[in-house]
Amino acid sequence: MQSREIRLKSRPVGVPSHEHFELAETTLGALAEGDVMVRNHWMSVDPYMRGRMYDRASYVPPFAIGEPLQGGAVGEVVESRSPDFAPGDLVSSMFGWREGFVAPAGALEKLPRAGGVPEQAFLGVLGMPGFTAWAGLLEIGKPQPGETVFVSGAAGAVGSIVAQIARIKGCTVVASAGSDEKCDWLRSLGVHHAINYKSCGDLNAAVKAAAPKGINIYFDNVGGEHLEVAIENARPFARFVECGMIADYNATAPAPGPRNIMQVVGKSLMIRGFIQFEFAALRPQFLSDMMGWIASGDIKWQETVEEGIARAPDAFIGLFSGANTGKMLVRL
Ligand code: NDP
């Protein structure tokens, strides 16, 4: 089978652009005993991939120049030399950024086809971003009814699920996003106060107006000014769930810390970062909760879809300008 893939051509400095990626065609090799051949239907682009484009040690190894990029994908088995998989099986893998691949069966996870949920949901609401939202908010934030939760990047894959789980848990939800359309969508999901951080003028004043008594939980997807504003508006003993800091992912020099960090002491704040796989053992509980909320209509989601492997770099680059509402995906 012929397959096209996207390779990393050079390491971006600042915001990535097309020159850093190349499209290549390969012929998939013959299957060894235990191998499976998969045709991908969908691939994910995620902000964390920007970190893997730097040549530095992190919790995942850097992408190699000249090699296909990796990431979450959902596809269909087309040929199998493993007793665990048969042609037609739906599988998820980390062999994204390519139309097809051959891999050992152990690198694949079989997905259910039932339930009326589209298969690409396993890259979003039922996949890594949904799990990140669920685990970060519930295991670290521990929201209580009547509390106020502030979430940034709220119209994205993770943020939109955080906002809805906070609402389900009986919290007042303050959410920020980068356009009026995104804020309208968030209100339609039951968010109590949606702030367009690009047009509100004074983010600190906007959060203060939305939460005059302060916030109990800040779910941070953005860092930068948002983090400073959250500290400013934190109630004593507020919990900060540090999920991501996308405002700094393309920085060419280390970003300065929040100028008001001293308030962490006086307000007894808890600031806790995490990588979602810390909570991997809780995935069955997550799937049960999320399937239930989807079935009851309590959780809704959106997708922004780019068509075809050649558009994968555009999808990825678009994450940094807010091109997506909900999960950014590429249909292959
Ligand atoms: P999103 O779907 O939220 O896409 C990224 C969004 O970030 C954009 O749509 C844009 O929305 C916003 N954004 C981009 N640049 C900036 C900026 N400079 N300032 C403010 N907002 C910006 O991505 P995900 O939901 O997949 O990821 C959200 C965050 O969660 C990221 O920081 C990611 O790294 C992190 N993450 C962490 C995980 C973990 O295990 N800790 C796992 C998964 C994700 P807008 O229009 O609102 O600006």
Image (spheres, rainbow, N blue to C red):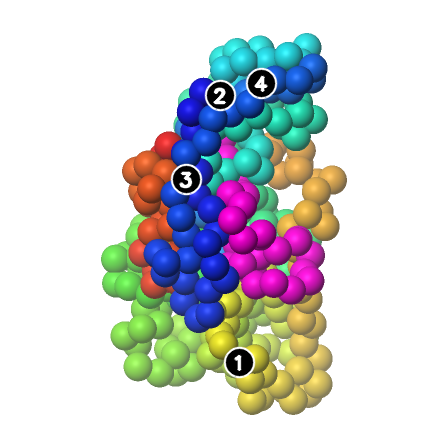
Disc 4 on helix, strand or loop? Answer: loop
Residue bearing mark 3:
24
Pointer 3 with pointer 1, Cβ within 8 A: no
Q: Residues within 10 Å of mark 1 (few under 14, many from 20)?
A: few
Quadrant where the N terminus is found in the figure? top left
Residue bearing mark 4:
30
Residue 312, above or below 254: above
Q: Nearer the viewer, residue 164 or 254?
A: 254
Residue type (three-letter) at the residue carrying disc 2 = Glu
Q: Is residue 308 left or right of residue 215?
A: left
Q: Residue at x 61, y 55 (%)?
A: 62
Q: Earlier in the sequence, mark 1 or mark 2?
A: 2
Q: Residues within 10 Å of mark 4 (few under 14, many from 20)?
A: few
Q: Residue at x 70, y 42 (%)?
A: 280
Residue bearing mark 2:
76
Residue type (three-letter) at the residue carrying disc 4 = Ala
Q: Nearer the viewer, residue 232 or 259?
A: 259
Residue bearing mark 1:
253
Residue type (three-letter) at the residue carrying disc 3 = Ala
